[in-house]
Image (spheres, rainbow, N blue to C red):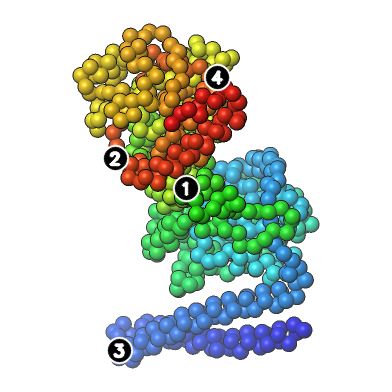
Amino acid sequence: MCRPRKKVLIALLIFGAIPVGFMLYSLASEKGETYSTYEAKPEISPDSLKMQERVREMEDQNAALRKQLSQNQNQLLRLQMTLAAANDSSSSAKIKCINAEPDIPKCEPDIAWIPNRHYSGVFGLMKLTLPKTLPETMNKVIVLDTDVTFATDIAELWKIFRVLRGKQAIGLVENQSDWYLGKLWKNHRPWPALGRGFNTGVILLDLKMLREIGWMQMWRLIAEKELMTMLAVSLADQDIFNAVIKQHDYLVYRLPCQWNVQLSMNTQSEQCYSEASDLKIIHWNSPMKLKVKNKHVEFFRNMYLTFLEYDGNLLRRQLFGCTNGTSNQTQDVVTSDHYEDDDCYDFRAERELIHRTHLYYLDHREDGGSEGDSDVTLVLQLSMDRLQMLEMICKHWEGPMEVALYMSDAEAQQFLRYAMGSDTIMGRKNIGYHIVYREGQFYPVNYLRNVAMSQVRTPYMFLSDIDFLPMYGLYEYLKRAIPMADMARKKKALIVPAFETQRYRLEFPKSKTELLSMLDMGTLFTFRYHVWAKGHAPTNFAKWRTATTPYTVAWEQDFEPYVVVHKDIPRFDSRFLGFGWNKVSHIMELDAQKYEFVVLPNAFIIHMPHAPSFDIAKFRSSSLYRKCLKILKGEFQRDLSKKYGIQALKYLSVD
């Protein structure tokens, strides 16, 4: 059925090649004549000027022909893929979703022995092990470097698998620099390669075929042989892939160059595209990345930055069904219990959102655990408008921190640029930054706290807020106080008294004595003394002024201190969004679990002034907001009494 189509394709190629060959021959002849004319007559004659004009016209025509030929090649490729799809009996198979991640075997022993000069280290060699590392049931895979930007649908790249024939198992784009030609500098001696070699930033791998030909043994034998003279790889896995293809060229399928437009320092990639529509994948394969010197770099950089501005939530909707019997559901907030005529529908719906979350957004390294059983982590959450507090807190707290940041995709990139420009932030590797992507109209304060708490690795944690600066030395003080309170055996919550200043510039007190002096002078105040005194009144600040040892206080309604607790305590109730009752409810549950509240006599935190948040503005201006908060409070109190029985009935009387 396909033979007539193949004959038509062959005829098209033959007839297309004749005019192209004629044009190239004419151009070469005229260039030769022009060269002879210049040699014979140094002075430029009118005939020579006409000849130059003719040459320029021919070059323009030649460029147009090259572009037309490129388009014909793309059309031919699409036609081949269409024919292959028509004959592919498996093309009608449904896409299956893999919901469970397989256990990935360790692959370092297979590659750690290879001497490597590339900046990616051992990680840059892992592509070589994919036929062994990935499950046997996985037959094909697209392998991408992390520094590529797609300008088209990746499904178009996947379709090219249908064109691979025979033992073609590796789809690659030719290298777009002269690296493997050995011409970049004197005595440059690259690894062996077929012609210009191939770039491995974008790879189609037929895993089934590679397993059948014994890929793991094949590349290892060739690498061992070449390393005897080359001593080390310079371009990581790419050198070894090229050495294998040099000896076994039947393995490679040449991808059109648009599928890997390389922006390395010595690239010649502009020959690959003439219009933006030609671009498929942009590969930032220079160590300079976005700062690489290229005459079109601004255009490419704008494409990359535009991609970063996209709202990732748009990609969460399910586009096709899974056939493996399990549902891959997106979060549907409309349930039978939530009716749209409910005034508080928005509150109830948003608490069911599962936010996209990127854990450890920046480089993070866990401490070796040298602090033992009394180590403590500072837990914080913030939005973009509080970002400036991070550096100050880093200077006040030297211990580990877990920070949840509520941001849009664009704001996450702003945070990344801000962090990379801060020596204070980049110098700390014991801080986990976790991006929770914005969705919905309310600030999910307790959801954020729970995300940060879930990543705590120390036995204890200090639950604070981003607006508070800890006293200098608080980290070391808490590590001493925890074992003295016997928190390993007793259910205790250590209270760190909270104060506030109304001054944006504050000479931070270095001791309790200095703080008391500033209290007396009116520079500092107890936290929220003028608007919400009962939130911290049970701390008993009058007693704290003269206390030299920890003392116990009783829970009272609306109590919301900042506490140091064991990391296994109950999580915050996520029904509370925005402003109001988010900490009160948590302290109430700790009291229901019979935690003892102990005030530390020589510890303190100070709240720094800031503009009112959007949520507190809504609380103050919207009667519906306050009404719904009151309803949620009542529901929480009833749930608490059901969970803890008669001992929790006292919470029902709380207004």
Residue 151 in the image, given as x and y percentages of width and height = 50, 65
How far apart marks 3 and 2 lie (CA) works out to: 77 Å
How far apart marks 1 and 3 lie (CA) works out to: 88 Å
Find numbered disc 2 in the image and state the secondary structure of the residue it sits on. Answer: loop
**For this view, does 71 lie left or right of residue 609?**
right
Q: Look at the numbered discs 2 and 1 and tell me whether their residues touch, using CB distance below 8 Å.
A: no
Q: Return the residue at label 2.
A: 611
How far apart marks 3 and 4 lie (CA) works out to: 103 Å
**Residue furthest to the bottom:** 47
Q: Quadrant of the C terminus?
A: top left
Q: Which residue type does callout 2 highlight? A: Ala
Q: Which residue type does callout 1 highlight? A: Cys
Q: Which mark is residue 45?
A: 3
Relative depth, front residue between 404 and 400: 404
For the residues carrying marks 1 and 3, which lies nearer the camera in this image?
Answer: 1
Find numbered disc 3 in the image and state the secondary structure of the residue it sits on. Answer: loop
Q: Which mark is residue 344?
A: 1
Q: Residue at x 68, y 71 (%)?
A: 163
Q: Look at the numbered discs 4 and 2 and tell me whether their residues touch, using CB distance below 8 Å.
A: no
Q: Look at the numbered discs 1 and 3 and tell me whether their residues touch, using CB distance below 8 Å.
A: no
How far apart marks 4 and 2 lie (CA) works out to: 37 Å
Q: In the picture, residue 570 is in which quadrant?
A: top right
Residue 364 in the image, given as x and y percentages of width and height = 50, 35
Q: Return the residue at label 4.
A: 594
Q: Earlier in the sequence, mark 3 or mark 2?
A: 3
How far apart marks 2 and 1 lie (CA) works out to: 27 Å
